[in-house]
Image (cartoon, rainbow, N blue to C red):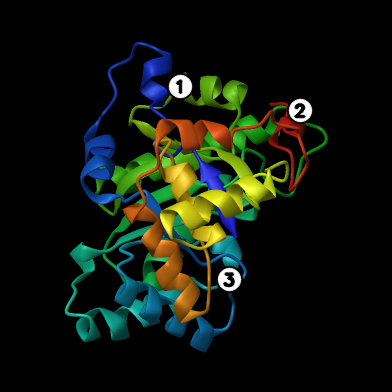
Amino acid sequence: MLIRAALLLALALLAEADYDYTGRDYMKDKAERLIFGLWRVADGKIVHDMIDNALAAGYRTFDTAQGYGNEEYVGQAFKELLPKHNLTREDVFITTKVKETNQGPLAKGSIEESLKKLQVDYIDLMLIHWPGALPDDPKDPKHNATMRKQTWQTMEEFYGQGKLKAIGVSNFLQHHLEDLLSYAKAYACSTRTKDKGRVNPTYDEAKVEELAKKYEVSTKTLQFAWILNQGMSVLTRASSPDHIRANFGADNVTMSAEDVNSLKTKEVGTKICLNPAEVIY
């Protein structure tokens, strides 16, 4: 799996406000652009082995979520594996996310549960996973906005206590962000998913293969490198040790501007997952 993401979108640039920028500075210092994802991995041994191989390859930034159902496995894996790799908690960056069904009044308990399952005193980055909240309230058209605000304010409380080092949102569109900016006190990091699955379904496959040979890497590594060379972040997932190492190698590939531009194509608007535009408020 690959996500082409514009990570660390500076929401504060959208409006003049006196934000707490501590989280932004923390992200700049600690978060890496090549991220190891744990989406759809709910087997404890597989999670353990994936993290083991990822740490060995050089990954230090990891992504999970309450909705992935594996926070407990992730926490146990880090507890066992950090000493093995001569690392400490401070050497890794862990992101997790508040599930749609845990927004609003349930947010506090869910964040406390994430801390417990991950076996950490703090989480590096906590995101609101989705702009909509479940279950929906058909009698209140602004139910989602109300739940988001309560969730965000709860996250700010944990942020103020140092239990969340940075906070932000995921899959929010402009109108969701503008609403957030009307009450946010802390700088909000935003992840925006551009492509999920293959890098771009309209790629010129022959061109990809040509460039992969030129840079002496696999086609998948070349695709990851293409994104990194545009200053964006890549969220990867693999279980094979060879694939994990190959994916991490994308950070060592420096492409020419001409080669990067040769792979850019017009977006076709292919629907690949839930559409946040359906969350009107």
User: Residue 191 at what x, y percent from top left?
Assistant: 49, 40
User: Residue 236 at what x, y percent from top left?
Assistant: 50, 60
Which mark is drawn over residue 138? none
At horizontal 59% and vertical 27% (from top left) the residue drawn is: 176
Which mark is drawn over residue 141? 2
Taking the image as shown, residue 159 lies to the left or right of residue 267, namely: left
Q: CA distance from mark 1 to mark 3?
A: 30 Å
- Looking at the image, tell me whether mark 1 or mark 3 is earlier in sequence order: 3
Which of pointers 2 and 1 indicates the residue nearer the eye? 1
At horizontal 31% and vertical 51% (from top left) the residue drawn is: 32
Q: CA distance from mark 2 to mark 1?
A: 20 Å
Amino acid type assigned to the residue bearing label 3 in the image: Gly
Which mark is drawn over residue 69? 3
At horizontal 72% and vertical 30% (from top left) the residue drawn is: 277
- Looking at the image, tell me whether mark 2 or mark 3 is earlier in sequence order: 3
Amino acid type assigned to the residue bearing label 1 in the image: Leu
Confirm whether residue 20 shows in the render: yes
Question: Which residue matches tag 1?
Answer: 181
Q: Secondary structure at mark 2?
A: loop
